[in-house]
């Protein structure tokens, strides 16, 4: 079964206006993706400079369209995408 990873990097040392509100909205969007069966996992990076999202049942092009809908997207430094086949 295919998985798409979105590796999101952002500099949390720079202040983001309305961060609490944006985080709330970010969690709502990710929660809908999880409920819809598209988002399988969300990993916070240990150094707190981003997250890795693991999607299932969607192709990489769809994920590339989904990520810019996240409220914090304008503050992302980079998003790297990769598709993998889950073996077990």
Image (spheres, rainbow, N blue to C red):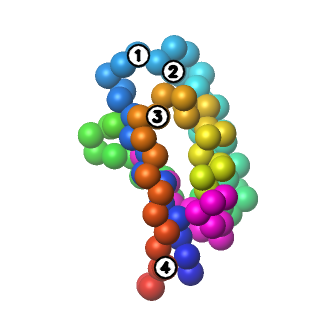
Work out whether mark 1 precedes mark 3 in sequence or the reverse, and give the earlier one: 1
- Residue projecting furthest to the front: 61
Residue appearing at x 61%, y 56% in the figure: 63
Residue appearing at x 34%, y 37% in the figure: 49
Mark 1 and mark 4 in contact (Cβ < 8 Å)? no
Question: Exactly how many numbered labels are in the figure?
Answer: 4
Mark 3 and mark 1 in contact (Cβ < 8 Å)? no
Assess disc 3: are there few (<14), some (14-19) or many (≥20) residues with their C-alpha within 10 Å of its C-alpha.
Answer: some
Nearer to us: label 2 or label 4: 4
Q: Is residue 38 visible?
A: yes
Disc 3, SS: loop
Q: Is residue 55 left or right of residue 45?
A: right
Residue 75 placement (x, y as % from top left): 48, 28
Q: Which residue is mark 3?
A: 76
Q: Which residue is mark 1?
A: 15
Q: Which residue is mark 4?
A: 85
Q: Which residue is mark 2?
A: 19
Alpha carbons under labels 1 and 2: distance apart:
8 Å
Q: Is residue 24 left or right of residue 7?
A: right
- The magenta span reads 50-62
Alpha carbons under labels 4 and 1: distance apart:
37 Å
Residue 40 placement (x, y as % from top left): 56, 62
Mark 2 and mark 1 in contact (Cβ < 8 Å)? yes
Disc 4, SS: strand
Alpha carbons under labels 3 and 4: distance apart:
26 Å
């Amino acid at each position: 079964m295919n998985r798409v990873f979105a590796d999101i990097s952002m500099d949390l040392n720079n202040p983001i206006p309305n961060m609490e509100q944006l985080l709330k909205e970010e969690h709502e969007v990710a929660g809908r993706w999880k409920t819809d069966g598209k988002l399988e996992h969300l990993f916070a990076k240990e150094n707190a400079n981003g997250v890795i999202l693991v999607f299932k049942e969607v192709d990489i092009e769809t994920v590339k369209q989904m990520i810019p809908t996240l409220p914090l997207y304008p503050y992302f430094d980079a998003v790297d995408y990769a598709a993998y086949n889950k073996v077990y």
